[in-house]
Image: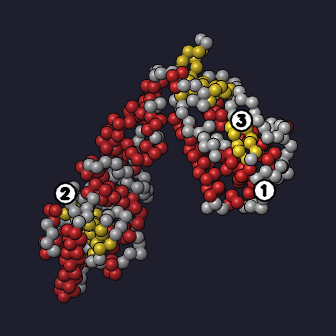
């Protein structure tokens, strides 16, 4: 075995690796040993200084150099033999190795690269400077604990961004300093060397409170982006619990304010901004100001779902009709009355059921003095989808009954056919069990008594399937 002791930088590794390649030393024959700046290097070769290493006759893809530079910043000691294995294989017949994503060396290097990139991003996002006096001058000092050896690589970013400040970023591995003209680096320091709180903290908190968008808050995504280990160094982190608590109310206020503005923007559709909360009342309240698609303009009001929060059955229709629009309640018109009758015959108490619609505003066109139902477009449905998804998330029914093709296709896609699938218990990502059937308004449109009676019986039968599925648990 051959031992290469080297300063763990990309340039030093590259010089040593070139020499090893030129001497045809196979990857399994080398032990890569990292040393500190004050330790003597035990080079395998006479000289492994990058400046005196002759240019290599071997050629590697540019992508390898970019990958190797980032992988070399990873904290895992195994990165050096991994890089040499890749280099060896690339220069020994496997020129397209990096295109084989499933290769274990390539995959491992890809994981290391990703982790380093994320760490670089986190440092840029979470470094917070505190003002201190240093030699009679203002100096800004930050404490950060990187996961990998990224300080030197990342320092030019801070020098660019904070060019007019004098600053230091202290870390346990390495410290970076900017005096307004040049960057320099010193050895790492303990956390106790970093300054405590200052008036900048209040500034950060004010800034964060202003940019915090309660309508977009997703707690899990937020913690993934800002892991808790960074919180103790972030002044604004103390605000997070109270901001989350106030978020639903702030969403309502935001929506009220933006309604007038959005009303002027014809033809705009966007996903309805639903607050992340387990309170049905808060979500219902927020939906009142929704302007996420143009339907609110010609409707009287949002018609949100109704029923117990712990209902085991949820019925999902298409959209409110004329009477629902006027009263603000779902399924109270002629189709709703027929639904009540069918539910009763199927042995279901409507008071135990949560009833809602895929789209929450009435879409209609005038015909004389009448308002005639119009089918919602796919854009209307997509914009409104967050509302019924929120209802599903909060109520968590055992069985969801889709009434008609609009509701069924919102769950299963446009190729779904209720006529083929009705009355069967299906699975979906949104609800554990789903039963699809026709919309009760279709029963009213049957051409004669006989077909109406036949369709009505089938409808009751489908509701019975849903009830049995709900009772199964
Ligand atoms: S139909 Fe839905 S998305 Fe469109 S404005 Fe009404 S509640 Fe919002």
Image x and y of residue 29, in percent: 74, 50
Is residue 337 visible in the rendered structure shown here? Answer: no
Nearest to the observer: residue 160 or residue 108 = 108
- Hey, which residue is sitting farthest top in the picture? 136
The answer to which of marks 1 and 2 sits earlier in the sequence is: 1
Give the quadrant of the C terminus: bottom left
Q: Earlier in the sequence, mark 3 or mark 2?
A: 3
Q: Is residue 262 or residue 45 the one in the foreground?
A: 45
* Residue 276 in sight from this viewpoint: yes
Disc 2: which residue: 308
- CA neighbours of label 1 inside 10 A, class few (<14), some (14 to 19), many (20+): some
> Percent from the top left, x then y, of residue 225?
48, 44
The single residue placed furthest to the front in the displayed view is 1
Task: Answer with left or right where residue 386 lies relative to residue 323.
Answer: right
Whether disc 2's CB lies below 8 Å from ligand 1 is answered no
Instruction: Mark 1 or mark 3: name the one nearer the start of the chain.
Output: 3
Task: Report the mark closest to the observer, 3 or 2.
Answer: 3
Residue 200 drawn above or below residue 243: above
Q: Position of residue 159 (x, y in %)?
A: 64, 30
Residue tagged by mark 1?
Answer: 91
Q: Indicate the position of residue 229 as horizontal and vertical percent values.
A: 46, 37
Q: Which residue is mark 3?
A: 7
């Amino acid at each position: 075995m051959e031992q290469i002791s080297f300063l763990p930088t990309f340039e030093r590794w590259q010089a040593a690796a070139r020499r090893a390649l030129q001497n045809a030393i196979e990857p399994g024959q080398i032990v890569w040993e990292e040393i500190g700046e004050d330790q003597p290097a035990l080079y395998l070769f006479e000289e492994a200084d990058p400046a005196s290493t002759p240019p290599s006759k071997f050629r590697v893809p540019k992508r390898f150099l970019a990958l190797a530079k980032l992988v070399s910043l990873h904290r895992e000691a195994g990165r050096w033999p991994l890089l040499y294995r890749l280099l060896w294989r690339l220069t020994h017949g496997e020129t397209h190795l990096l295109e084989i994503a499933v290769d274990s060396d390539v995959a491992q290097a890809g994981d290391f690269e990703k982790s380093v990139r994320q760490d670089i991003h986190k440092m840029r996002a979470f470094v917070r400077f505190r003002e201190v006096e240093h030699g009679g001058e203002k100096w800004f000092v930050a404490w950060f604990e990187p996961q990998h050896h990224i300080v030197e690589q990342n320092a030019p970013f801070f020098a660019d961004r904070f060019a007019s400040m004098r600053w230091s970023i202290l870390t346990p591995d390495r410290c970076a300093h900017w005096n307004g003209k040049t960057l320099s680096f010193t050895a790492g320091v303990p956390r106790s060397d970093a300054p405590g709180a200052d008036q900048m903290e209040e500034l950060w908190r004010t800034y964060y409170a202003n940019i915090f968008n309660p309508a977009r808050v997703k707690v899990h995504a937020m913690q993934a982006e800002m892991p808790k280990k960074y919180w103790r160094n972030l002044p604004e982190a103390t605000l997070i619990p109270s901001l989350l608590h106030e978020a639903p109310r702030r969403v309502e206020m935001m929506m009220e304010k933006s309604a007038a503005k959005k009303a002027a923007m014809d033809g705009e559709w966007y996903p309805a901004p639903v607050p992340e909360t387990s309170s049905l009342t808060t979500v219902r309240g927020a939906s009142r100001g929704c302007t996420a698609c143009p339907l609110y303009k010609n409707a009287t009001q949002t018609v949100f779902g109704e029923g117990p929060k712990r209902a085991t059955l949820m019925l999902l229709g298409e959209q409110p009709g004329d009477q629902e629009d006027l009263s603000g309640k779902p399924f109270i018109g002629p189709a709703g009355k027929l639904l009540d009758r069918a539910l009763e015959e199927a042995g279901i108490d409507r008071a135990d059921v949560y009833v809602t619609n895929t789209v929450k505003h009435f879409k209609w066109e005038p015909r004389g003095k009448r308002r005639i139902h119009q089918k919602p477009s796919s854009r209307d449905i997509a914009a409104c989808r967050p509302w019924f998804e929120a209802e599903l998330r909060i109520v968590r029914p055992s069985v969801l009954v889709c009434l008609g093709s609009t509701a069924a296709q919102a769950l299963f896609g446009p190729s779904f056919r209720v006529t083929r699938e009705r009355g069967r218990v299906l699975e979906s990502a949104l609800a554990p069990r789903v039963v699809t059937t026709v919309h009760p308004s279709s029963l009213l449109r049957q051409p004669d008594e006989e077909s109406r009676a036949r369709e009505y019986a089938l409808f009751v039968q489908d509701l019975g399937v849903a009830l049995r599925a709900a009772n199964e648990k």
